[in-house]
Image (spheres, rainbow, N blue to C red):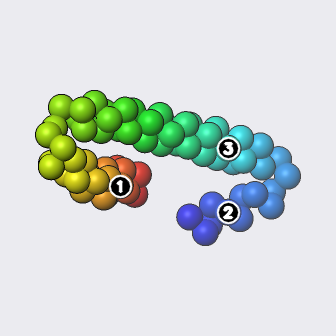
């Protein structure tokens, strides 16, 4: 990765490194926002189905979601 950052200093190849990097960052950020919003809506739906005394279970699913996203991304 560090060798790849050296290509940013080369004028002729900079656009072939920087443009895909920006596109990938935007796509990953958009996918993360989309997945988080979808998961939040799913948790709201699940919370409506659970009895009141089991509502705390949905709070435990956020760390599971975060760990899954981290595993997929990294």
Q: Decide: marks 1, 2 in contact (CB < 8 A)?
A: no
Q: How far apart are marks 1 and 3 (CA)?
A: 23 Å
Q: Is mark 3 on a helix, strand or loop?
A: helix
Q: Relative to residue 59, is residue 44 depicted above or below? A: above
Q: How crowded is mark 2: few (under 14 residues within 10 Å), some or many (20 or more)?
A: few
Q: Which residue is drawn at 61% across and 69% down?
A: 2
Which of the two labelled residues, at mark 1 and mark 2, occupies the earlier sequence position? 2
Q: Relative to residue 69, is residue 5 depicted above or below? A: below
Which of the 4 image quarters holds residue 41? top left
Q: Is mark 2 on a helix, strand or loop?
A: helix
Q: Which of marks 1 and 2 is in front?
A: 1
Q: What element carries label 1?
A: helix
Q: Residues within 10 Å of mark 1 (few under 14, many from 20)?
A: few
Q: Nearer the viewer, residue 2 or 12?
A: 2
Q: How far apart are marks 1 and 2 (CA)?
A: 28 Å
Residue 35 seen from this side: no
Q: Which of marks 3 and 2 is in front?
A: 3
Q: Which of 47 and 37 is in front in this view?
A: 47
Residue 66 image label: 1
Task: Please give the residue where the numbered disc 2 appears in the rendered image.
Answer: 5
Which of the 4 image quarters holds residue 50? top left
Task: Please give the residue where the numbered disc 3 appears in the rendered image.
Answer: 22
Measured as percent of width and height from the top left, residue 59 is found at: 28, 53
Which of the two labelled residues, at mark 3 and mark 2, occupies the earlier sequence position? 2
């Amino acid at each position: 990765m560090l060798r790849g950052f050296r290509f940013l200093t080369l004028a002729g190849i900079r656009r072939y490194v920087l443009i895909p990097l920006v596109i990938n960052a935007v796509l990953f950020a958009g996918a993360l926002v989309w997945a988080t919003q979808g998961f939040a809506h799913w948790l709201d739906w699940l919370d409506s189905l659970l009895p009141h005394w089991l509502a705390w279970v949905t709070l435990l699913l956020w760390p599971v979601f975060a760990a899954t996203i981290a595993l997929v991304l990294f």
